[in-house]
Image (cartoon, rainbow, N blue to C red):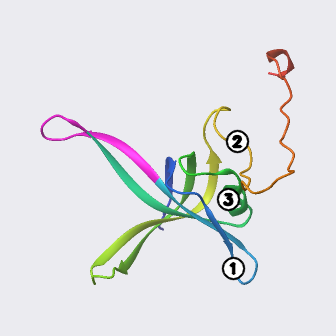
């Protein structure tokens, strides 16, 4: 038996790119950065960033392209693959690629939670937020 599952919490490195397969299946890809702090031998704190290429399929792909933007935090679960390729200089390179099976938005209400809209969409009505008090929340 084998098992391949990765859980990542990080920030988008660029806006998601949505495309469709010839059969019409949505595919969304973006990069995700995870950060950790380590102390080096001199005792100084160093930030270490690891980059992952994320691929989402189906309805999750459409949701990601609609709501996520560069810098936004997100939770991703999926299967990890190492993609090997040769760069222009003939050197072997490796990319960490995640075929995501689950995605969850992270962040408070103050962060972007409405769909992205193109700047050149005049006459589009802005959503109106209702005033909600603590008495209106059922829990």
Residue 113's tag is 2
Look at mark 1 in the image and give the residue it sits on.
21
Under circle 3, the secondary element is helix
Chain-order first, disc 3 or disc 1:
1
Badge 1, how many Cα within 10 Å: few under 14, some, many 20+?
Answer: few
Do labels 3 and 1 touch, CB within 8 Å? no
Residue 60, percent across and down? 70, 59
- Left or right of 129 on screen, residue 9: left
Q: Is residue 39 a member of the stretch shown in magenta?
A: yes
Chain-order first, disc 3 or disc 2:
3
Q: Nearer the viewer, mark 3 or mark 1?
A: 3
Residue 138's tag is none
Look at mark 3 in the image and give the residue it sits on.
65
Under circle 1, the secondary element is loop
133 is higher (above) or lower (below) than 67: above
Chain-order first, disc 2 or disc 1:
1
- Left or right of 65 on screen, residue 122: right
Query: Which quadrant of the rendered structure holds the C terminus?
Result: top right
Residue found 27% across the figure and 82% down from its top: 89
Badge 3, how many Cα within 10 Å: few under 14, some, many 20+?
Answer: many
Residue 99, percent across and down? 55, 66
Residue found 74% across the figure and 53% down from its top: 117
The magenta span reads 33-45
7 is higher (above) or lower (below) than 26: above
Using the numbered discs, state the Cα–Cα distance from disc 3 to disc 2 in whole angstroms.
13 Å
Under circle 2, the secondary element is loop
Q: Is residue 124 a member of the stretch shown in magenta?
A: no
């Amino acid at each position: 038996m084998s098992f391949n599952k990765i859980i990542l919490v990080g920030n988008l490195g660029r806006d998601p790119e949505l495309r469709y397969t010839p059969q019409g299946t949505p595919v969304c890809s973006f990069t995700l950065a995870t950060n950790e702090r380590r102390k080096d031998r001199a005792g100084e704190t160093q930030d270490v960033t690891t980059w992952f290429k994320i691929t989402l399929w189906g309805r999750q792909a459409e949701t990601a392209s609609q709501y996520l933007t560069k810098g936004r935090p997100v939770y991703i679960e999926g299967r990890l693959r190492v993609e090997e390729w040769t760069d222009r200089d003939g050197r072997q390179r490796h990319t960490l690629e995640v075929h995501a099976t689950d995605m969850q938005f992270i962040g408070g209400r103050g962060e972007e939670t409405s769909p992205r809209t193109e700047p050149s969409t005049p006459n589009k009505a802005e959503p109106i937020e209702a005033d909600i008090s603590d008495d209106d929340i059922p829990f």
